[in-house]
Image (cartoon, helix red, strand yellow):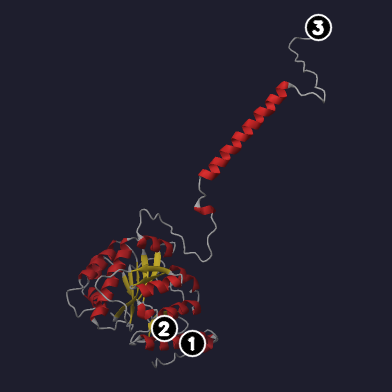
């Protein structure tokens, strides 16, 4: 029986010394395809620049912005870089007088975070607001988060003492700036630089977010209205606090003898906070103390403010003593801690 014609018969294998014409053509075709592919990949590699994510980050580089700079200004960018996950920023304002000297106020302020309990990482969330070129350059040299606050017609370089006209102007400009931060959707803790942070305050400062506005006191009287100290405030960004800061700043020209602290105290006394539906808290000096009234227990103290103390040199001397007291207290047993006494503020 004949085989079916559908059976394919392969040609005999060529001899080793022979190369069929069609094989040469196939090899030439394959080579051409590979060459084109290679040229295509080479074109893509050369024509397309590498993305920033593939580049090595330079050593000690500034933190990268989390926001698109084409749609945000400089303040937006630095706030995004500095804030915590819940958009909270620690803000401190400095001028030339606070960054100069063998040991400046800014240096001592940062030392407090180094010596504090659980405070080292908070430095990453501090925004230093500089009011002159010298303080701004010092901030950048320290590789902190920095923002230069432009102020026309006011010399913010020298130290400003309480009661001085330029002091009032500085405080009101600060109030305006903090209101701007709230409008950009950021909560903040404002801290004077003559405050030492000895413990992390976030577990104490209303973690359930029930308070819109919290402010320190020079002397705490329980539920009675204390003499508020605007050098340490914790403020949530919402419509109530934005209205508060707008109204607060608008009062700057009502009475030239009034400080911004006087105005906020009046707001509390005359019921303006209540009218806004704003929930506030006066901070106990047990936790947020100062030279006006020391914390009653070293086991609870969070911050120490060099209030009731005039002049940078005096503040530096007595705050340095506070750091020594703190280092001494950390070595005490529980029983010894209960008997701890602060050193006198001699300077």
Point out the frontmost of discs 2 and 1. Answer: 2
Using the numbered discs, state the Cα–Cα distance from disc 1 to disc 3 in whole angstroms.
Answer: 110 Å
Which image quadrant for residue 72? bottom left
Residue indicated by mark 3:
2
Q: CA distance from mark 2 to mark 1?
A: 21 Å
Left or right side of 115 for 242: left
Depth order, front residue of 159/174: 159
Q: Residues within 10 Å of mark 3 (few under 14, many from 20)?
A: few
Q: Is residue 249 above or below residue 40?
A: below
Give the mark nearer the N terminus: 3 vs 2: 3
SS at badge 3: loop
Task: Decide which of tag 2 and tag 1 comes sooner along the chain.
Answer: 2
**To which residue does mark 1 refer?**
324
| First in sequence: mark 1 vs mark 3 | 3
For disc 2, the marked residue is 101
Q: Residue at x 49, y 87 (%)?
A: 324
């Amino acid at each position: 029986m004949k085989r079916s014609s559908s059976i394919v018969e392969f040609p005999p294998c060529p001899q080793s010394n022979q190369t069929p014409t069609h094989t040469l053509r196939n090899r030439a075709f394959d080579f051409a395809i590979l060459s084109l592919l290679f040229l295509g990949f080479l074109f893509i590699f050369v024509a397309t620049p590498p993305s920033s994510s593939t580049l090595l980050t330079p050593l000690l580089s500034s933190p990268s912005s989390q926001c698109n700079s084409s749609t945000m200004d400089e303040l937006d960018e630095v706030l995004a870089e500095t804030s915590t996950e819940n958009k909270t920023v620690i803000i401190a304002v400095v001028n030339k007088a606070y960054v100069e000297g063998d040991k400046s106020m800014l240096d001592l302020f940062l030392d407090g975070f180094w010596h504090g309990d659980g405070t080292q990482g908070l430095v990453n969330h501090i925004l230093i607001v500089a009011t002159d070129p010298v303080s701004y350059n010092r901030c950048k040299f320290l590789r902190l988060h920095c923002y230069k606050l432009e102020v026309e017609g006011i010399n913010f370089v020298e130290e400003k003492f309480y009661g001085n006209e330029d002091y009032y102007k500085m405080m009101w400009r600060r109030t305006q700036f903090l209101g701007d931060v709230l409008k950009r959707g950021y909560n903040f803790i404002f801290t004077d630089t003559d405050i030492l942070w000895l413990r992390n305050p976030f577990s104490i400062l209303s973690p359930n977010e029930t308070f819109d506005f919290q402010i320190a006191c020079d002397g705490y009287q329980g539920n009675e209205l204390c003499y508020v100290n605007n050098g340490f405030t914790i403020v949530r960004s919402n419509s109530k606090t934005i209205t508060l800061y707008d109204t607060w700043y608008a009062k700057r020209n009502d009475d030239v003898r009034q400080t911004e602290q006087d105005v906020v105290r009046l707001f509390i006394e005359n019921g303006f906070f209540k009218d806004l539906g704003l929930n506030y808290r006066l901070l106990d000096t047990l936790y947020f103390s100062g030279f006006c009234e020391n914390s009653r227990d070293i086991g609870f103290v969070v911050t120490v403010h060099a209030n009731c103390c005039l002049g940078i040199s005096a503040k530096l001397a007595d705050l340095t003593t506070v750091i020594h007291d703190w280092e001494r207290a950390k070595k005490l047993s529980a029983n010894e801690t209960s008997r701890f006494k602060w050193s006198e503020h001699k300077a």
